[in-house]
Image: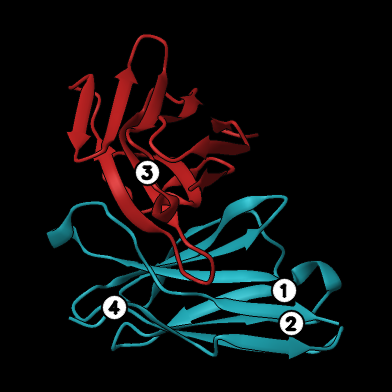
């Protein structure tokens, strides 16, 4: 079974631009969560989508948004990029059939210059 | 507010030694405690997990010890190997949530 796929793997953007990251969950998984990972803050929860609805949201500004499609694929958008948005963005998918384990993708490394 | 506190931040161990990483939590609603292992360039992957109805769980060289009254749990890596060099995250979830609250991570280096 294919794992969680995130694209692109690497991105370099300029301050003020916007960016869209994509996540394809494991087949059959309907829950998709997004995390920001930085050396100083560790893994911080952004939001979770389930059946195309945002079910949980972390403590991030409104510049961070997401959505989920009917096939459970998810996208995350960051508008008006700031230098501090440079991070590894991780997507995880989950399914009640597999307990509460979160299966992570390899992440998208975003660098804002 | 950091709900899961992890220490140490970094750890260097000789091959064959024991690596110990500790975590403490405050939220008594947490009922599932996974440990994740992350190699450079990869996402975290579940290593081992425990529920509070047991005090210890062992899988190969990896053992979780759980102290419910102290609200602490720890990961022990026996006979540590250079291939164990990675970042380890403890986490906790409550009520069947898919969203773990993570510790800050421990960077483990095992010297050959």
Query: Of the numbered discs in the image, which one, if any, rests on residue A63?
Result: 1
Seen at 68% across and 50% down, the residue is: A41
Seen at 51% across and 75% down, the residue is: A107
Chain to which the residue tagged by mark 3 belongs: B
Q: Residues within 10 Å of mark 1 (few under 14, many from 20)?
A: few
Which structural element holds mark 4? loop
Residue A18 appears anywhere in the view: no
Q: Which residue is mark 4?
A: A3
Q: Which residue is mark 2?
A: A79
Chain to which the residue tagged by mark 1 belongs: A
Dividing the picture into quadrants, the one containing residue A98 is bottom left
Q: Quadrant of the C terminus of chain A?
A: bottom right
Q: Residues within 10 Å of mark 3 (few under 14, many from 20)?
A: many
Give the distance between the C-alpha atoms of the residues marked 4 and 2, in whole angstroms: 28 Å
Query: Of the numbered discs in the image, which one, if any, rests on residue B35?
Result: 3
Q: Which chain is red?
A: B
**Callout 1 and callout 3 share a chain:** no
Which structural element holds mark 1? loop
Seen at 27% across and 54% down, the residue is: A101
Tell which circle, 4 or 2, labels the residue nearer the N-terminal end.
4
Tell which circle, 1 or 2, labels the residue nearer the N-terminal end.
1
Mark whose residue sits in front, 3 or 2:
3
Contact between marks 1 and 2 (CB within 8 A): the answer is yes
A44 is higher (above) or lower (below) than B111: below
Q: In the rendered view, does B57 fall on the left or right side of A113?
A: left
Q: In the rendered view, does B27 fall on the left or right side of B105?
A: left
Q: Colour of chain A?
A: cyan
Seen at 37% across and 87% down, the residue is: A69
Q: How is the image coloured?
A: by chain
């Amino acid at each position: 079974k294919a794992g969680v796929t995130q694209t692109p793997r690497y991105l370099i953007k300029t301050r003020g631009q916007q960016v869209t990251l994509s996540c394809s969950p494991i087949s059959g998984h309907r829950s998709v969560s997004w995390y920001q990972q930085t050396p100083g803050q560790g893994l911080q929860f952004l939001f979770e989508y389930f059946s195309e609805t945002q079910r949980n949201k972390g403590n991030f500004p409104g510049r961070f948004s997401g959505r989920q499609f009917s096939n459970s694929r998810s996208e995350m958008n960051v508008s008006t990029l700031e230098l501090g948005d440079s991070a590894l963005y991780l997507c995880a998918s989950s399914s009640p059939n597999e307990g509460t384990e979160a299966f992570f993708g390899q992440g998208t490394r975003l660098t804002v210059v | 507010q950091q709900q899961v506190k992890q220490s140490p931040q970094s750890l260097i161990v000789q091959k064959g030694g024991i690596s110990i990483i500790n975590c403490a939590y405050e939220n008594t609603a947490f009922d599932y405690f996974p440990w994740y292992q992350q190699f450079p360039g990869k996402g975290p992957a579940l290593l081992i997990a425990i529920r509070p109805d047991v005090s210890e769980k062992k899988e190969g060289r990896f053992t979780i010890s759980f102290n419910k009254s102290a609200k602490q749990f720890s990961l022990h890596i026996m006979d540590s190997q250079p291939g164990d060099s990675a970042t380890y995250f403890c986490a906790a979830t409550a009520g069947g949530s898919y969203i773990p609250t993570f510790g800050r991570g421990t960077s483990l280096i095992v010297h050959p």
